[in-house]
Amino acid sequence: MLRGTVALAALGAIAAIAGPLPAAAADATQQDFMQLSTFLTGHHLGPVLGSRYFAALQKRNPDLVAQMNALGSVIKKSNVANMDAFLELPSIDPRLMETATKIVSAWYLGVVGEPEDAELIAYGEALMYRPTRGILAIPTYGPGPDAWGPKPDTKI
């Protein structure tokens, strides 16, 4: 029992010296993404969808974390209370605005990417349906022929 306690203490000391674990860093980055998303959209958002949006956005943009950090820094320095106030700032770096737009677009449309590589993350949970939830049914049809994907090659 004493050996186990010593081993655990040693493991704790090694972990403290080595610094935070990658999972902890990932959790912190995920929290940053959720805080930024909440600011940008003005809505309470779910962490499960948030992690899926974050993964899809990062897959298409390896610099996403750095851009999120820069965007968060501008928001904090400008001391704006919400996205409307942020949009009224006199000069916003177009790259940061593009990052903000992609994050907001993902949450509202439920899709990440351009038509060629679009990835559906959420359908009924997309923010665009919140204002009419309970009043209008969420559409269950595509916007046109072959909208959901190419026809299968099999013959029936």
Image (cartoon, rainbow, N blue to C red):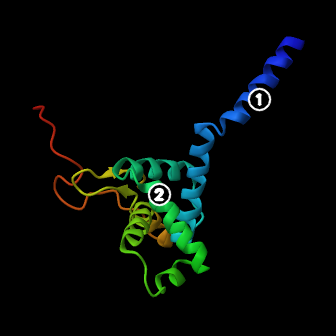
Badge 2: residue crowd in 10 Å (few <14, some 14–19, many ≥20): few
Residue that badge 1 annotates: 12
- Pick the residue in front: 93 or 17: 17
Badge 1: residue crowd in 10 Å (few <14, some 14–19, many ≥20): few
Look at the image and tell me in which quarter the C terminus lies: top left
Q: Name the spot of residue 96 as percent of width and height, x first.
A: 42, 69
Identify the residue at image location x=89%, y=13%. 2
- Element class at badge 1: helix
Say which mark, if any, is on residue 52.
none
Amino acid under label 1?
Gly
Q: Is residue 99 left or right of residue 3?
A: left
Residue 82 appears in the rendering = yes
Q: Is residue 85 above or below residue 133?
A: below
Q: Name the spot of residue 86 as percent of width and height, x first.
A: 51, 80
Q: Earlier in the sequence, mark 2 or mark 1?
A: 1
Q: Is residue 61 above or below residue 3?
A: below
Say which mark, if any, is on residue 66.
2
Look at the image and tell me in which quarter the N terminus lies: top right
Residue 41 appears in the rendering = no
Identify the residue at image location x=17%, y=52%. 146
- Element class at badge 2: helix
